[in-house]
Amino acid sequence: MAYVTATEKDLHEKPNEETVSVLNPYLMQMKADILYHFALGTETHDFPSMFGDVKFVCVGGSPSRMKAFALYIAEELKLGDSQNDIPNICAGTDRYAMYKVGPVLSISHGMGIPSISIMLHELIKLLYHSKCSNVTVIRIGTSGGIGIEPGSVVITNQSVDASFKPQFEQIILGKTVVRSTKLNADLAKELDQCGKEINEFNTVIGNTMCTLDFYEGQARLDGAICSYTEKEKMDYLRAAYNAGIRNIEMESSVFAAMCNISGLRAKDKAFTVLEQDPMDR
Amino acid sequence: MAYVTATEKDLHEKPNEETVSVLNPYLMQMKADILYHFALGTETHDFPSMFGDVKFVCVGGSPSRMKAFALYIAEELKLGDSQNDIPNICAGTDRYAMYKVGPVLSISHGMGIPSISIMLHELIKLLYHSKCSNVTVIRIGTSGGIGIEPGSVVITNQSVDASFKPQFEQIILGKTVVRSTKLNADLAKELDQCGKEINEFNTVIGNTMCTLDFYEGQARLDGAICSYTEKEKMDYLRAAYNAGIRNIEMESSVFAAMCNISGLRAKDKAFTVLEQDPMDR
């Protein structure tokens, strides 16, 4: 196992700080690119005119919540009437839903690392083909809080795995590759400051644990399978709290890793916002 | 790492061969159980009357395809008019969609191991609360074929990981647990026989590789990140073919593992049917 650094980064020259890059030489040689899970393609859609002005991409699990978010942003930015419907750009598929309001793209990613990973590959290619620059990507979602007030918003400092390590393990051609999941600390502070100015909810900066499973992976006692005791669960969650973890969810590690190694990291603007669901845990 | 055997199995007495069991002593003590991602609960819904007659559960990624499948089954079983709409039982959420036609339940599970895993936990609990017996679960989906005719149907003999091992690794309380992903060979033969009788498509019994990633995890050259060469890709796929792998997808390992250790394995009726998508790979 080793951190992927030189090999991938050296595939191309240093990405321009302003634009979104892909780290794939084969993509440059392709005449056409089909983003299967968005039902969009470079031969059927004019990406620069559709998406060239995108500056913010907000992603979250549920299609209906991401539509509600787009309507909210339309109201906030005074771009259109929130009573009007906003078309789903990915209407040709039910894998993901995508809405655009001015410079903001709102996309659903389903649940779990593999589901958001497919979306991120196609999103990065979409931004690249659209020649977008200075793009900030934000993940918004519900999560289970640890030792914090229900309803708090956790701003992820770094994403850690189930062993509390700030890394994302991935299997490529049968070999394990480890990628960093650190996020920009200054940006977390800036966002924390915004939360304090709004002053409507508790905001916390902390580590976010990313798991591959909701029930056993998050030490829940109400799944179909449970082979540990309540005491073992509490010991694990206490150890997580002591490691600086304030919430648990299922997508942040690959989100951080892919932003880190793609052009989106150029401005170090990738971060995760996780809204704690009071129903949860 | 060790196979989970005694510990989990001994949590309860041997499950009755006829009924669906849960392997969680805490669940028995709970007054009410909420299946969050189905928007169903034991206090708000009468599970035995809603689902008690279920004998077959067919699961697949896309909500619209699983609705189309339910309409097809309604026509085949002459249960209702395929022109009529079938209500989505999980209409209270957009995480999953669920349709029922007589003894057949058709459920979407999204993409990837974590997404299907949440659904399977709640499905097993649903069947348990409903006191269902002799249930067969079938996964139907598209996959990338290796060395077979496009359009073939692959019946999974066993699900293997990206290192070609018939196992599913899961992290529970920070520790790695390995579960078996073998499926019933006799059933695969039976299903193969059905395919030959229908005689409308090529049917193959083979190993299915289950990956956590669609692009880099399946050696594709058209993702946003690609750090290997086309030759390395082909060498990997050739090695997979030589290990008996005939297709690649993203859910079969946890599907096999959870059926193996839950009551659904009692009849050894769990298997995966994967329809190859000719568009794929």
Image (cartoon, coloured by chain):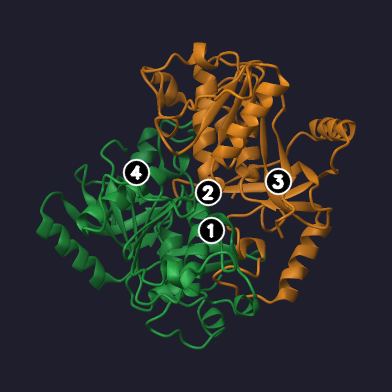
Chain colours: A green, B orange
| Quarter of image, res B280 | bottom right
Question: Which-is-in-front pick, marks 2 and 4?
Answer: 2
Q: Nearer the viewer, mark 2 or mark 3?
A: 2
Label 1 crowd bin: few (<14), some (14–19), many (20+), radius 10 Å:
many
Report the amino acid beneath label 2: Arg
Cα gap from disc 2 to disc 3, whole angstroms: 24 Å
User: Horizontally, is B161 left or right of A270 in the view?
Assistant: right
| Rendering coords of residue B13 (x, y %) | 58, 20
Give the spatial CA distance, label 3 vs label 4. Answer: 34 Å
Disc 2 chain ID:
A
Q: Label 3 near label 1: C-beta < 8 Å?
A: no
Whether residue A179 is visible, yes or no, is no
Q: Chain of mark 4?
A: A
| Tag 1 and tag 4 share a subunit | yes
Residue under the image location 38 percent in, 49 percent down:
A249
Q: Are marks 1 and 2 on the same chain?
A: yes
First in sequence, mark 1 or 2: give its number.
2
Q: CA distance from mark 1 to mark 3?
A: 21 Å
What chain does badge 3 belong to?
Answer: B
Say if mark 2 contacts mark 4, CB within 8 Å.
no
Residue A235: mark in rendering: 4
For residue B159, the mark is 3
Identify the residue under disc 1.
Answer: A118
